[in-house]
Image (spheres, grey):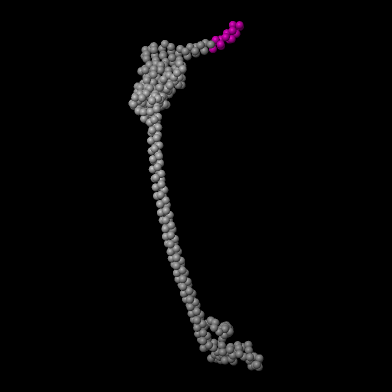
Amino acid sequence: MHLGKFTAKYIIPIGIFIFITMFIITIKFFVIKVSVDQVGVRTRIWSVNRGIIQKDYGPGWHRAITAIDQWDLYDSTVQTLELAKEPSRMGHDERKEAAIRTADDYDVSVDMIVKYQIKKGEAWKLRQNIGVGDRYKIIVENETRDIARSVFGRMVERDLYNPAEKRKRADECKIQLTERLVPRHVDIIDVLILEMRFDPQLERKIKNIKLAELDNVLNKSKTLAAEQRGITQTIDADTEAVAQKITGDKERSITVLDAETTKRTIELLAAADKYLVQKKAEGDLYKQQRKAEGTLLIKQSQAEGERLRREALAGMGGDIIIAMEAARNINLADINISSLDLNLLDVDDMATRLGVSDTKGKLRVDPKTFKQIQEMLNQPKGTDTAKPK
């Protein structure tokens, strides 16, 4: 029972220890880790197919059996080569800049930076053709110095302070360096010129030349300014003349337009007056014509009424009218009438007694016709009379 407890108490820690030990041994003797900023190249040093594996290994864990596999790790990021002065441990600056001899025999120091990177997928070729370690970095630096001496050595003193010329030389240096390092399996990202330092004699000469050029530019600027002032004055005078001409043309145009507008207005008013007079005359003529036609109709109506009156007086109607006039002129206050001999309510008898008779001696008058004749006689003189129906 005691043995079982002892086993349960120590078996688990022993197992963990063994597992950790085996894991450490495996990592140390059987695998290798390639970081994210690295690329690995594996070489078989003991095998039937010995030699470099033609493949780049990216970040992660890879097989690395001791005495069988050999690994070389390279920087896969963009690297920087800086050719400039650096402080050393001895207390003075270490000269690493590129030393140049110009075309006109002056010593110039160029501080420059080269950005480069191992070509993707060709790290194993770099290991095979150049070797292990940082030998490729030494090749990049040597090629850069050689090309810098060739490219910048063709410059003269006037080019040394010309920024455009510096950029042109840097681009040329990048192109040549890229061509040189293609078989070295290195890509050139960019070439930058930081500074150019000259010897004191050349610096004074360049300063004097620069001052002379600035004086020349200043004199040219002054001359150009004077010319521009003259041109400006000429432009001002021309502008003033043009403005005056435009103003005169404008005033003349306004006067002409005003005269044309006045003339057109007078013409329109005359045409309107003429139209008004014409329409008024036409209206008066139409009025007179209508009035004459009305007067003619009145005259014709009066003549027709008179004709009808005469026709009425020529026949039986005349006897009736005479009888009515006689009856109207009778003064009943002065006449004594016997109701036995005369019946005033007998119209026929009264008409016969007043002179109206037919062939038989009796009156044959329609009471309605008699009433119309009476109304006609009662109308004032000069009005129209209608023909009895």
Residue 248 position, x and y percent, is: 42, 56
Q: Looking at the picture, does residue 83 appear above or below residue 383?
A: above
Q: Residue at x 42, y 53 (%)?
A: 244
Chain part drawn in magenta: 1-16
Residue 85 position, x and y percent, is: 43, 21
Residue 170 position, x and y percent, is: 38, 27
Q: Quadrant of residue 254?
A: bottom left
Given residues 292 and 73, the one toward you in this image is 73
Q: Quadrant of residue 69?
A: top left
User: Is residue 140 in sight in this rendering?
Assistant: no
Please state, as top left, top right, bottom left or bottom right, where the N terminus lies in the image.
top right
Given residues 203 and 138, the one toward you in this image is 203
Q: Is residue 7 magenta?
A: yes
Q: Quadrant of residue 256?
A: bottom left
Q: Looking at the picture, does residue 120 appear above or below residue 66?
A: below
Q: Is residue 200 magenta?
A: no
Q: Residue at x 65, y 93 (%)?
A: 334
**What predominant SS class does the magenta segment belong to?**
helix
Residue 109 position, x and y percent, is: 39, 23
Q: Residue at x 57, y 91 (%)?
A: 355
User: Is residue 109 in sight in this rendering?
Assistant: yes
